Amino acid sequence: MRQLLLPMRIWDLPIRLFHWTLVVLIFASWLTARLDWMRLHVWSGLSILTLLLFRIVWGFIGSDSARFVRFLKSPLAAIRHLLHLHRREPDTETGHNAAGGWMVIGMLALLLVQAGTGLCANDDVLTEGPLALTVGKERSDWLTHIHDVNFTLIEIVVALHVLAIITYRVLKGHNLLMPMITGKKRLPGATPAPRMMHPLLALAVFALCVLVVVVFLWSVRYSP
């Protein structure tokens, strides 16, 4: 007997906006670096930093599917999940699966390194990060090198992420893309729905993160 599948909201609007805005900003950062539009590159990086601050806070107080404690499983659980990747079975996840959770953490960590090193980087011409003078030229050059190498790692993880979406679709029949667009996934009727936090709370958190970044930039610019 076929199991009854019902549409269920698993991703809130803040997480979906975070995801797709981050996609646009990562591409913008790559493009502005390639075209040597460094001022725009700096602003793209600061926007990514603001989004990351929001995602970290939302990972503790946000909707169930966004919380780190809900989707971050043990490495052993992630390995067991990957060993069953070839099995075509119903999707019962109300958020990230055990392997996907670690990919999220890895991507957030890489992006934090990218944003952090970008604050201290320089292009040896006209543009430098807000903290480049603070850390000194030698350390700034070293962090600029880390910034360049780390973006290659981000490109690899993005490629793995896209490959994972295709693999899940082909091998398991799971559509991971549409839920991140619509917020909904068809799940067995008995699946408990994740608790969703009000979007206004997310808006308040995001506004606070913007304020933190603005105050940081102001303090760096006007510090003695």
Image (tube, rainbow, N blue to C red):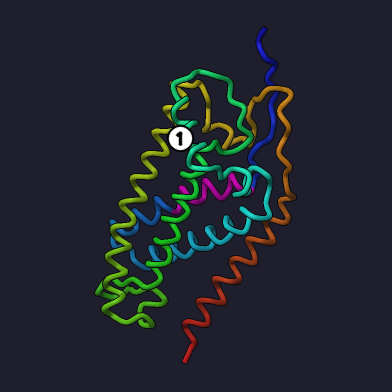
Q: Which residue is mark 1?
A: 79
Q: Quadrant of the N terminus?
A: top right
Mark 1 is on which residue type? Ile
Q: Main secondary structure of the magenta part?
A: helix
Q: Which residues are magenta?
A: 14-25
Q: Is residue 24 magenta?
A: yes
Q: Is residue 72 above or below residue 4?
A: below
Question: Residue 138 sits in which quadrant?
Answer: bottom left
Marks counted in the figure total: 1
Q: Is residue 105 above or below residue 186?
A: below
Q: Residues within 10 Å of mark 1 (few under 14, many from 20)?
A: few
Image point 45% across, 56% down: which residue? 109
Position of residue 187 measured from the top left corner of the image (x, y, whole percent): 66, 25
Q: State left or right for residue 182 relative to residue 102.
A: right
Give the residue at the far bottom of this rendering: 224
Q: Is residue 145 above or below residue 200?
A: below
Q: Nearer the viewer, residue 8 or 218?
A: 8
Position of residue 83 measured from the top left corner of the image (x, y, whole percent): 44, 27
Q: Nearer the viewer, residue 42 or 189?
A: 189
Q: Is residue 196 magenta?
A: no
Position of residue 92 measured from the top left corner of the image (x, y, whole percent): 62, 27
Image point 44% across, 50% down: which residue? 107
Give the residue at the far front of this rendering: 76
Q: State left or right for residue 51 relative to residue 66.
A: left
Position of residue 17 measured from the top left corner of the image (x, y, whole percent): 58, 48
Q: Secondary structure at mark 1?
A: helix
Q: State left or right for residue 165 relative to residue 36.
A: right
Image point 30% across, 76% down: which residue? 139
Image point 64% across, 55% down: which residue? 60
